[in-house]
Image: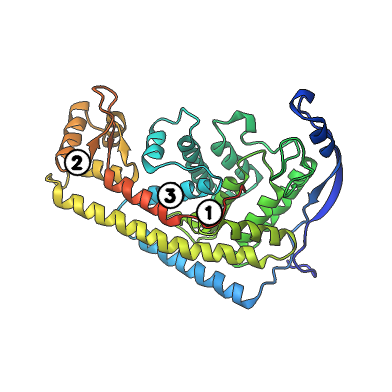
Amino acid sequence: MASDTAWPAIGWEKHPWRSSLPPELVSRRLRERHSGLYSAAVVPPIAAARVDLPSAVLALADEASVEIARYDAEVGASVAPFGALLLRSESASSSQIENLTSGARAIALAEIDEGNRSNAARIVANVRAMEAAIDLADRLSADAVLAMHAALMAHEPDHTPGRWREQQVWIGGTNVGPHEAAFVPPHHAWVRSAIDDLMAFVHRDDIPILVHAALAHAQFETIHPFTDGNGRTGRALIHAMLRAKDLTRNVTVPVSAGLLTDTDGYFAALTAFRAGDPAPIVTAMAQAALIAVATGRHLVADLQATRDRWAERIKARRDSAVWRLADLLVRQPVIDAAVAQSELGTTSANTHAAIRQLEEAGVITEFSGKRRGRYWQATEILTALDDFAARAGRRGRPTRA
């Protein structure tokens, strides 16, 4: 299915521009700077493009793939419910690349009540997008991408959740026009055809898995098919492809946490991809995956150690609802009585009895200080998650995807 050409670079085409901002909001000089023709990218088709990478890059991607598969098997063999927290950690790291940060407790609270527009709620929306990506992995299509975006942007209707953009967007510069932008994605008239070509590329079976996911992600970010949420949706696409190709079967490897260690390098790799050099983005993705496995192992070890300490402190029969509530706290470290009762399927009285036992064992503490509508937290789990986020860290000045 290969063509006779090397990886194609983007081209450029001119379009007229007229700012839609009211004249009283923009100075005459600024309006003049953002008038007339601007250059938008022309995204080349890649459905049949030849993937020709240096042997060292392919070897690194293969090494990372082996580590991902090994890690997925290790965590999958555990009886502890780590999968949900790993997915949430990946979603939080992906959001952090977009400068959306929040502590583990705020995110866990937002999962109980998603009815606000805080950063934590946006991160929870990214969790939903990741879940949609995994659920749709076996039937990846343009509609699946729309479903991911719809889950991500459900509470932000201004950005038309689940719909391709119908306006020009740009990255960097000012909000007056695209003339001084760092990158101007293709005109909206070309979005759907570019996405259809990308989906044809996604369904190829002649490309190593991690290489395939990295290139598809970079092409998606170049198309930039939505008015917002492109970075997070594009990283969800990575996980959908890893699952679709059976590289991951049990958990979501926190690749975005690896990308966070060098966001400048990540964005430089996307720029190189657009210039016709796919090696840097594959290298960045492989390196991020290796870092992700290392940090993910650390997180799982912390969680397992916490669970083991609980086992020493909890004094209850093994068939008791208390143990099921403890398992819930590993994946949902902030609870209220309604969440606990729904999970346990018991009466209100029995649910509160289980909560009291975990309080007495020092597993959870009540932190709302209210008589009604109380919340409890598993501090050790929250600490492990915040430590994971701190390890992910970042070098250099953050940049928008």
Packing grade of label 3 (10 A; few <14, some 14-19, many >=20) is many
Residue 130's place in the image compared with 336, above or below, is below
Packing grade of label 2 (10 A; few <14, some 14-19, many >=20) is many
Gap between marks 1 and 2 measured at Cα? 34 Å
Gap between marks 3 and 1 measured at Cα? 13 Å
The image quadrant that residue 112 belongs to is: top left
Spot occupied by residue 277 in the image (x, y as percentages of width and height): 71, 66
Question: In this orientation, does residue 337 appear?
Answer: yes
Q: Which residue is mark 2?
A: 322
Gap between marks 2 and 3 measured at Cα? 25 Å
Where disc 1 sits, the SS reads helix
* Mark positioned earlier in the residue sequence (3 or 1): 3
Spot occupied by residue 184 in the image (x, y as percentages of width and height): 75, 47
Q: Which residue is mark 3?
A: 89
* Mark positioned earlier in the residue sequence (1 or 2): 1
Question: In this orientation, does residue 203 appear?
Answer: no
Q: Amino acid at mark 3?
A: Ser
* Mark positioned earlier in the residue sequence (2 or 3): 3
For the N terminus, the image quarter is bottom right
